[in-house]
Amino acid sequence: MNILSVRDLRVRVGSGHAAMTAVDGVTLDLPPGGALGLVGESGSGKSTCARAIVGLTPTAGGQVLLDGRDYAGARGRHLRELRRRVQLVFQDPRASLNPRMTVGEAIGEAAAAGRRLSRQARAAEVARLLEQVALDPAHAQVRPGALSGGQRQRVALARALATRPDVIVADEVTAALDVSVQGSVLNLLRRLRAETGLGLLVISHDLAVVRYLCTEIAVMQLGRIVERAPTPMLLAAPQHPYTRALIEAATLTGLDGEQVAEGEPPDPLHPPSGCRYRTICPVGPLVDESRRICVELDPAAGVDGRRHRAACHFVPAETVV
Amino acid sequence: MERKRLSPAHVAVLAVFGLLLALALVGPIVWGDRAEAVDLEALGEGASWAHPFGTDDLGRDMFARVLVATRLSLVLALLTAGLGCGLGLLLGLLPTMLGSHLGKLAGSAIGLLLALPGLLLALLVATIVGVGATGAVVGLAVAIAPAFARLTQTLAAQVADSEYVAAARMTGISLPRLMARHVLPNIAPALVLQAAMTIGGALLALSALSFLGLGVQEPQYDWGALLNAGLDRIYVTPAAALGPGIAIIIAGIAFNVTGDAFAGALAGETIRPARRSGRGRSRSAAASSAVPANGPSTAGSDAVLQVDGLSVAFEGDGGTLTPVRDVSFSVGAGERVGIVGESGSGKSLTALAIADLIEPPGTVQAKRLALHGRDLRELPERERRRLLVTSLAMVFQDPLSSLNPVLRIERQVGEAAEVHLGATRRQARVRAVEQLRELRIPGAARRMGQHPHELSGGMRQRVTIAMGLTTRPSLIVADEPTTALDVTVQRQVLRVLRRVNAEHGTAVVLISHDISVISAFCERVLVMYAGRVVEELAADRMHADAAHPYTRALLAATPALDADLDRPLATIPGRQPALDAVPDGCPFAPRCVHASDRCRERLPLLETLGEGRRVACWHPQGTALPVPEQEMKR
Amino acid sequence: MRHPWLRFALRRTAGFAVSLAVLVTITFLITQLVPGDPVRASLGPTAPASLVQERRAALHLDEPVLQQYRYYVEGLVRGDFGRSFTSGQPVAEVIADRFPMTLRLALVAFVVTLLVAVPLGMAIAVLTRGGRRPGIEKSFSLTTGFVVSVPEYLMATALVALFAVTLDWLPVTGSSDWTAYVLPLVAISAVPIAVLARITRVETLKVLDQEYMRVARSKRLPRRLLYVRHALPNTLTATLTVGGMLLAGLVAGTVIVENIFSWPGLGTAIVEAIPQKNYPLVQAIALLLGTIVLLVNFVVDMLLARLDPRSLIRES
């Protein structure tokens, strides 16, 4: 039984002629205490997906299942229950912490939401949470402005932990931090998962971050999951050309090889027919015109029993598992 | 927390403000009788000792009348502003409170009202309500409301969209609490300020209506009505018009300046938390350019760029800040050199200084700053521009903000050829298309007529590269050219730079915070910390040769796809020193695990360790080479 | 790509039409909302009942509201604004008589404002950038701050007192020759010039700090190109948007200033008409002034859409 399951999730954003389906049929599974990475570039819909899961963005279809119960489109009490159990941690702690509240107030407020806590109990809880994220409890008195980026992000994590969630959705939590402190936040997330059995859904553009935290990776492109597999399999034998491009880009290899023909990136407002990657795909019709199937048929990743799945008509034979 | 101190001018205005309030309270009590005393002996007199502003056509003392009118003028202004702001607040909250469709409607209604001239609205309402004080107050309130509504609407939308409100919603707190704790405190100060300033505006507008005879009617009077009466006799007794006029101006200025002062204090309060690290700049003796540093490592005569002892300083109120200190290096023809460092290390300012783009109050000092062996600072203006244009191209971080949003691509890419190479508009266009083709931009000819926002991120950055290449420079200085881009696009852009480098022998100086990008792209790497070069080494020997603890820490802290998963990631404790608090010794010492007393006291100089290797450290790691003993005291 | 622009133009035209319709409705509602009988209110309690009845019939006041609204709109389309309550003269004639005077004053003031304020603001921005020449900056902000605090009717009074009464250089009233324009123009445009120059300065400073200006500098362009081609168009969005709003203020200023200088325009007419309860005249003038402001804002928006392609995106 999965603690969190997302079934065929669809999210529409924008209005009028700028409307588009930012998340188009995404399916994810997170076992209790598991760690799943959702990787994609800007415009892939990964952050919209995260916000839709926790009910910050309305869904246009699909299910968000917690212990088998559907919370998609939940309101009122159900919505509060969903948010208590699935906490989102945002990218930039400077924006996600109210500048006018002290650290203790912010964490205390979250800890006391939905239950009664005496003043002392609340203070003790705040101190416990600050210690859990390796911060001095004395920090409860200061405002976020007085903290460094890494400290602020740990405060944001403590606030998320305050509601005693089952799952934390971490949306690019290191992207706004200096490289010198990114490690501390990543180490903390790993430790928390090991110690408390917290489920992790890690949203990131950075394969290295996701590899460090997650046991399974789903790759997202233009609103769809194009490949998913256990982390070592995905990195060692990527099947989708987009995943290969991501890995090549992350390792910065082959910078001076001859460039293949390059198409125009797909327009998210008017996604191409068939495969959405075909306009820039290095194995699709751009290089081999006989591959009409990419234009005509959508290679949706079949939901079958395989652990490694890719939505591509031309998965290289030697890597098929 | 220290408060922003008010200037003497502000104190004076606040005093005037207090005086006005006092007048409004006691004016009618003290001077009320005198203001009503009809004196048939002194009809329409000019200024005199007894009547400083003269008398009106019933012989009443104008000075007393001006003082007494303070109360009515202020009270009506308060009423108007209160009513107007209240209306505006309600109207302005509608778009956020109503759903998306009704909200949009309310938003357009506000826009519609805003488009109509306020005075016209006021006059129409006053016509309906009837001429008099009530009509004027209601009319002006209606006129004030739309602007206040728009402000409320904007602020509420901003705060409602902010991540901290989203984060608060995540914790599951109730809606009233969300409004009370997170939304209102963050919009209230700006609204209160606006309301206060509206009072001043209302005062002036009410006087205007009374002045036109459409406001306060006889026997009541406010400043506007007095001014109106005075204007009829302006040829005979100008003082009668002057008195109420002065009162109105003083009140107007008092309200405006008080508002400004509060706005300033408010802005100061919200900005302060962001930069807390003590702004009290200490005076640093910027004697660093006198330091006898070892010469640049590859200082051949064929060097495209030679930099020796480069410092960049900014003169401020509290002293001089020196974000770049004594930087020396050179770039050979066709070489790829990387500069890596955290934000604030001075790497971008180094790039700007090389390109002669540091603007006042910044100043550049250097022993040598030469392109193709010609020192830029020794050339006359015209020749320097020419040398810079033909030998150096800059590429900046964010391609969208690097391109002028209102100009077509054709203009922006072709411009340099037109201005500096004497090309015609048509030739420049041909040159631009060629350049775009060379960088493999699909549909190069079609791009000419487009604006930057019509291009994708990667294409934009290639356009900015093309822009610099039209004059065939021998050096590209690229400052974080891929930081704003996705990884796959970053790869494209790096490949483009690499090809230009390979095919035309164009040297590249790549600046980045990302040590993995630098080591993948460059041949030689300079590591900068707190304004200084702390290490220089070959890129492919980075992991093996890095001797400076900072370089090693940077490498270890960068999550890589081949990092050991069983070990926690390294972090570098502490922060880079603030510009005004750079320590006397090694700037990295406070964060360094190997730091000794010597490190804290004496600045290590950049010393040559071997072929193409330099390091500034008292305890270089992983090397058997002797530590240079030369040291200096700052 | 003409497509987005066309879409923008269509939407904006529709918006203009709606605003106009609302304006027409508001002015129509004046006679409906006035407490009691507008004709009686205007003619006074002593007027014979037969005259009141006659007037009411002429104004269709006894018919259903919607019917009246139809007559009103039909009248507007024909250019028939009714007759003045006080003189019996067709309102259209009064307007034809006075409108050119107001238009001339407002237009000249608008042009003067733009021509003075934009170059002034830009020049100050360029001169004082990066904390240079603090003296110029201080005196600029002090002067404009003072001017903004002085409302136009006071400015006008002070100008009259100084130049017409004390020095006797310029005429106080009327519109005989060009000298009569000087004082009203200064009085009307002083505040807008100060406001617009401040905004232009701030906007220019913002633009000069943009990365594309740094890129333009890195191309070593001559100053003229740098400021005119690269900076100016980017400041226009804010400047012209405010300019449109200032014009609304300018219309208001005209109403007031006309009264001080006894300028025979619409401003003096409406200020006379309101206490006299001469509703048809009030309606017509309000409609006309409002339409002018809407029209200018419309034109500014269309112009901006051509000059600054980003405004099309921002809209959608």
Image (cartoon, rainbow, N blue to C red):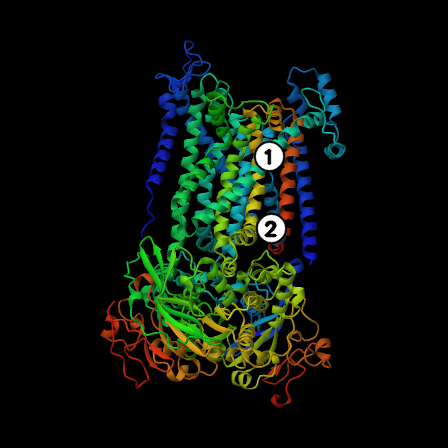
Residue at the bottom extreme, as displayed: A318
Density class for disc 1 (Cα within 10 Å; few <14, some 14-19, many ≥20) is some
Mark 2, secondary structure of its residue: helix
Q: Residue at x 52, y 57 (%)?
A: C221
Q: Quadrant of residue B460?
A: bottom right
Q: Which mark is residue C108?
A: 1
Find residue A260 and report its horizontal and vertical position in percent: 63, 79
Disc 1 is attached to a residue of which chain?
C
Mark 1, secondary structure of its residue: helix
Query: What amino acid type is highlighted by mark number 2?
Result: Gly
Q: Which mark is residue C255?
A: none
Find residue C216 and report its horizontal and vertical position in percent: 52, 59
Q: Nearer the viewer, residue A83 or B556?
A: B556
Q: Is residue B130 above or below residue A184?
A: above
Q: Quadrant of the N terminus of chain A?
A: bottom right
Q: Nearer the viewer, residue B214 or C302?
A: C302
Check if mark 1 and mark 2 are on a common chain: no
Residue with the mark numbered 2: B103
Q: Is residue A74 above or below residue C137?
A: below
Q: Quadrant of residue A129?
A: bottom left
Residue B214 left/right relative to B551: right
Query: What amino acid type is highlighted by mark number 1?
Result: Val
* Whole-number angstrom distance, CA of label 1 to CA of label 2: 39 Å
